[in-house]
Image (cartoon, rainbow, N blue to C red):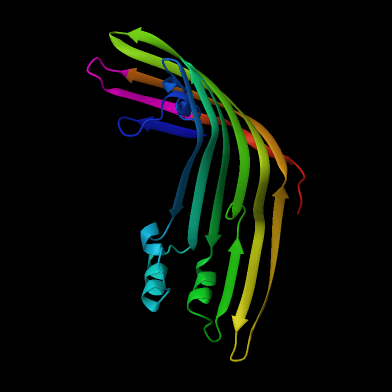
Amino acid sequence: MMFIFWLVGFIPEGPQAVGWNPALIYTEGWAINLLTLEAKIFNNCLPCSELMVDKIDETFKQKLLQSMPSDGFMVTGEFSGHILCIAYRNVGFAVKLRGSGRLQVARELLELLLIGNELNRTYEVHSEPMDNQANLFYDVGIGVSAPFELDNKQLKVGIGFHIYRGLCCMEVERFGFIGKTTENYIYGSGDVSAKIGESGSGYGMDFGITIKQPGGWEYGVSITEIGNLVWDKGEQR
């Protein structure tokens, strides 16, 4: 579930408001949008601009390790591809291809990769569920908005419904490694357990509201993706 509050800035309206704030669904006539893409990438260490380097030198290694939290390096990403978005007046319909991913690398493992092995050091790495996962699914949504007058203010209320169809999901349920370095070799043991889902289904709802002041200011709030997506077919371990 997502909670969104906004005052100013880029505000999706018309057909693209489906799944963002259904109260903003309104067009004078027919409106159609095709093939638009949105993507977001975050990490818990350095800005992405500082991670894009041509050469991994000693300065970069130390800067990355110093900025890294004790639980390691984590990066998350989301993307949404609007395949088809249609709106007519206060009704909107959208078909999207969506996905997200999360990757977390333990600090000790990254130190081993960047710096190399230290003599007589024991490396111990454990991963918990939800640390590393990725998914891809379709989102078919429909929304409707309704305008009202409230004390000379324009009030709009919207509601949306979603059908989710999962395409693929992968999750590392457990990962463990214990190793020790000597003068001649690294020895240790480890295990990994992963779950892969080939199909899933689910449903969701959105609620939104906007208020426009007589002077032109407009602000609103929305709660989106109230629901779930269950991966229930083709599960492999």
128 with respect to 25 (left or right): right
Q: Is residue 218 magenta?
A: yes
What is the residue that sits farthest to the left in this orientation? 215
Q: Position of residue 78 (x, y in %)?
A: 51, 46
Q: What stretch is highlighted in magenta?
A: 212-223
Rendered view: 102 above or below 37? below
Q: Where is residue 127 in the image (x, y as percent from the top left)?
A: 60, 60
Q: Residue at x 37, y 59 (%)?
A: 49
Q: Which of 54 and 99 lies nearest the eye of the viewer? A: 54
Rendered view: 124 above or below 146? below
Q: Quadrant of residue 58?
A: bottom left
Q: Report whether residue 169 is seen.
A: yes
Q: Which of 32 and 189 lies nearest the eye of the viewer? A: 32
Rendered view: 198 above or below 143? below
Q: Where is residue 214 in the image (x, y as percent from the top left)?
A: 24, 14
Q: Residue at x 66, y 55 (%)?
A: 173
Rendered view: 114 above or below 229? below
